[in-house]
Image (cartoon, rainbow, N blue to C red):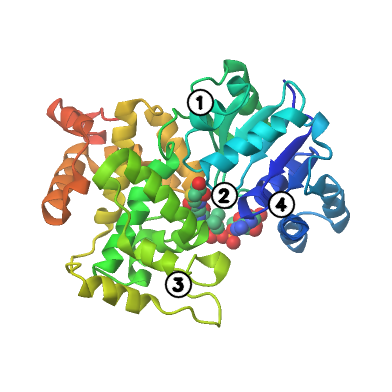
Amino acid sequence: MYIYKAAVIGAGTMGAGIAQVITYSGLPVILRDVTQEAVDKGLATVRKIYQGRVDKGKMTATELEQKMALVSGATDDTGFSDVDIVIEAIYEDLEAKQKLFQTLEKVCPEGCIFASNTSSLPISAIASATQKPEKVIGMHFFNPAPVMKLVEVVPGLGTSEETIDDIVLFSESLRKIPIRVQECAGFLVNRLLMPYLNEAAIALQEGAASAKEIDAALVKLGMPMGPLTLFDMVGIDVSVKVADILHDAYGTRATAARILRELDQADRHGLKNGAGFYDYADEKKGDLESLIQKIQAEGAKKTEFSSNRIIMPMINEAVISLQEGVASAKDIDIAMMAGTGFPQDKGGPLHYADQIGLDVVLSELESLCEKLGDRFWPAPMLKRMVQGGYLGKKSGKGFFQY
Ligand code: 3HC
């Protein structure tokens, strides 16, 4: 099915970013939210993204206006009778997403695809409330949507192959890299990213290093930004929700760092409201240090910092995901590079593990497990590979052949 017109529901950072991506490819899009104020804010965000390109000389002011003419704001169902795809990017609430698709099914054409940009809610559960689960699918963009190349394509239990193919082609037409991922909590990228981000937060609350030191160490390793800066960009409120969904699915290894909840309760939601792990506005909202002290006074033990402590949980979760068949080794690596900027020269977490040596990764995880707890428990597949002589590059075979 060719997509001629799209609608994006939710005009926040992600919704507006997705609308920009769609108009950039030349397609018309409706950007809908509940209030006119929210819609106007979303349209202003789209304009700002284009203005950035004009300022850099990558686009003319006339081209900007041509692109802006492709996006129309809405607070109701006007214009939905001929949309081919609806992408929802509203807040993470299962019932709200179910109700939204139920209502839109009544006004959208018969063949319309209902895609969810949910970070981690189950697509099958969203689809279960609709008349046509075969038309419901996860289409997960990454922040900032105009820049990050990845789209996770997540079929639910009832999604048809035709809908999957349509979303793969549509994502390619948006100049994105679609990777098909098996439905599971956090899908692929958030499932791997969160243990890494969370460990950085745990290291901080345990006084292992300062926020700046932690971020600097990971940037030195080649990550495009430090994990705590990334938390602030994604949003602490969003991250707490994702972390809770992961904990619910994967148990104690995914327990959210206490500091995340403290920041959330202190209304420090990250870049978007002026404060998170860092301060971005003149007006202060308490301070990070007192939250850390509170956690330490209540018993958090002092621990040591190392970059391995932060990166190993990502590698381990990559192996667990591979072992579960969430995606192939190649797709896992592509997804992490395209969705999070994992350094290209390391080739993704599994190529990186092969470079380090799987025996070294295993022994590092075992040592972290002993020092810091069971959340570092090595993936069974990793042990099996080491026992079988699959040590990575040095033995000519690991997750990949050399
Ligand atoms: N909107 C639009 N464009 C943006 C942007 C934004 N918010 N931020 C940066 N850009 C553009 C810049 O204009 C620039 O464009 P150009 O190449 O045409 O000049 C380009 O991106 C590079 O930007 P900068 O040079 O300013 O900055 P960096 O090179 O440091 O890159 C970054 C910024 C792309 C954000 C990089 O730091 C990065 O990749 N960070 C990791 C982001 C990440 O991990 N995202 C995933 C988060 S998880 C998620 O979203 C899932 C959700 O479910 C929670």
Distance CA(mark 3)–CA(mark 4): 31 Å
Q: Amino acid at mark 1?
A: Gly
Q: Is residue 400 visible?
A: no
The residue to which callout 1 is attached is: 156
First in sequence: mark 3 vs mark 2: 2
Q: Callout 2: 10 Å neighbours few (<14), some, many (20+)?
A: some
Distance CA(mark 3)–CA(mark 2): 24 Å
Distance CA(mark 1)–CA(mark 3): 37 Å
Q: Which residue: 41% across, 33% down?
A: 184
Q: Which residue: 28% across, 37% down?
A: 354
Observer-side mark, 3 or 2, equals 2
Q: Quadrant of residue 363?
A: top left
Q: At numbered mark 1, what does the secondary structure look like: helix, strand or loop?
A: loop
The residue to which callout 4 is attached is: 34
Rendering coords of residue 298 (x, y %): 21, 71
The residue to which callout 3 is attached is: 278
Q: Which residue: 22% across, 29% down?
A: 381
Quick one: quadrant of the N terminus?
A: top right
Observer-side mark, 3 or 4, equals 4
